[in-house]
Amino acid sequence: MSPVKVVLVGGPANLPAESRIQQVGTVADTVKVPLGAGYEHFRHQGENTTVGGENLPVFRWVMRTAIAE
């Protein structure tokens, strides 16, 4: 199965723009992006949008977790 390109929406404003486009194995996956002392979690909720002429699944921010020491 080939990776799926997705766009991340929501979450902290300081999440870099280059981190907003990710590759996942399937839209059922959760995207976990490291930021500061934690991880930002994003999930697909059925929505798509057009970015740069491509129709991409939208993964919305759902929570933040701390990095375990």
Image (cartoon, grey):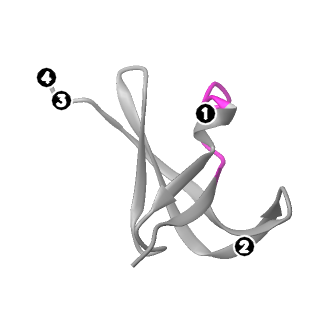
By secondary structure, the bulk of the magenta-drawn segment is best described as: loop
Q: In this view, does 9 lie above or below 69?
A: below
Residue at image x 50%, y 57%? 23
Q: What residue type is labelled 1?
A: Pro
Q: Which residue lies furthest to the left in this view?
A: 69
Q: Mark 3 points at which residue?
A: 68
Q: Name the residue under label 4.
A: 69
Q: Name the residue under label 1.
A: 12
- Judged left or right of residue 33, residue 52 is right
SS at badge 2:
strand
Task: Name the image quarter holding residue 29.
Answer: bottom left
Q: How far apart are marks 4 and 3 (CA)?
A: 4 Å
Magenta-tinted stretch: 8-16
Q: In this view, does 34 lie above or below 50?
A: above
Q: Residues within 10 Å of mark 3 (few under 14, many from 20)?
A: few
Q: Of callouts 1 and 3, which one flags the residue occurring earlier in the amino acid sequence?
A: 1
Q: Name the residue under label 2.
A: 48
Task: Name the image quarter holding residue 24.
Answer: bottom left
Q: Are marks 4 and 3 in contact (CB under 8 Å)?
A: yes
> What number is the disc on residue 63?
none
